[in-house]
Image (spheres, grey):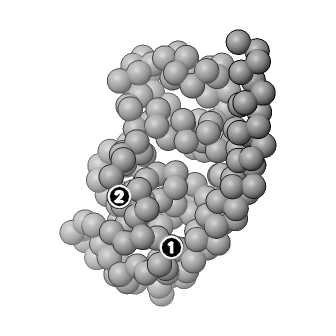
Amino acid sequence: MHSLGELAKALNRPMVYLTGLQARFELPVFSAAGYSEAYLAFLKGIVHLRTLNLSEEALRDLWRLEKKLLQLLHLDSAGSPTWFLDACGQTTHMRRGLLLTNHDLGVEIHTRMLQPGLNFTAGVPELFAGREMGEDAQRVLSEYLKLHGRIRTEANTELPSLRSTLAWAKRLK
């Protein structure tokens, strides 16, 4: 477990930057050493993607879609205050995981396949089905994949410049 100061040091960012991320991404805030490795891994992902010149707005949109998809799959009933972050940092089945939360969907997400009605909990059924209330996991996944594809394209476009910058920065040693 980490403190906010330790997170800031590990990410090489000021604490005020991290508190801003927490507010803008609506992340839980803990006192003392209340931040898990998964929480740190999530923030690392955001910092890395921002380093690739991706807009924070696009990342927040992706974050909202991931959380919505996870809610539609009933992963929000795990009981943890950081249920949406708990898979961050895992390194298995990376192609099956969502970009920010790294939750494993069981299939490569680029296949656009998702088992309808997939429910990771055995809770009390709702009065109306999610689809009847305007929620559809396939629709959310489709929106997610469009934005994820745009983010991947933008990141790949930035990679040559980043490589060039890293090569140039070696002169500063």
Residue at image mark 2: 93
Vertical placement of residue 120 versus 170, above or below: below
**What residue is at 64 percent from the left and 22 percent from the top?**
13
Q: Amino acid at mark 1?
A: His
Vertical placement of residue 112 versus 167, above or below: below
**What residue is at 59 percent from the left and 35 percent from the top?**
22
Say which quarter of the image contains residue 147. Answer: bottom right
Q: Residues within 10 Å of mark 1 (few under 14, many from 20)?
A: some
Q: Position of residue 151 (x, y in %)?
A: 67, 59
Inspect this view and state whether residue 54 appears. no
Residue at image mark 1: 110
Q: Amino acid at mark 2?
A: His
Q: Is residue 38 left or right of residue 51?
A: left
- Residue located farthest toward the bottom when viewing the structure as drawn: 132
In front: 87, or 20? 87
Vertical placement of residue 144 versus 23, above or below: below
Q: Position of residue 40 (x, y in %)?
A: 47, 32
Which quarter of the rendering shows the N terminus?
A: top left
Image mark for residue 23: none
In three-dimensional space, the C-alpha distance between marks 1 and 2, rounded to whole angstroms, equals: 13 Å
Q: Is residue 107 left or right of residue 171?
A: left
Q: Position of residue 112 (x, y in %)?
A: 49, 79
In front: 52, or 171? 171
Q: Position of residue 27 (x, y in %)?
A: 53, 40
Which quarter of the rendering shows the C terminus?
A: top right
Badge 1 marks a residue whose secondary structure is: helix
Inspect this view and state whether residue 93 appears. yes
Q: Is residue 30 left or right of residue 146?
A: left
Badge 2 marks a residue whose secondary structure is: loop
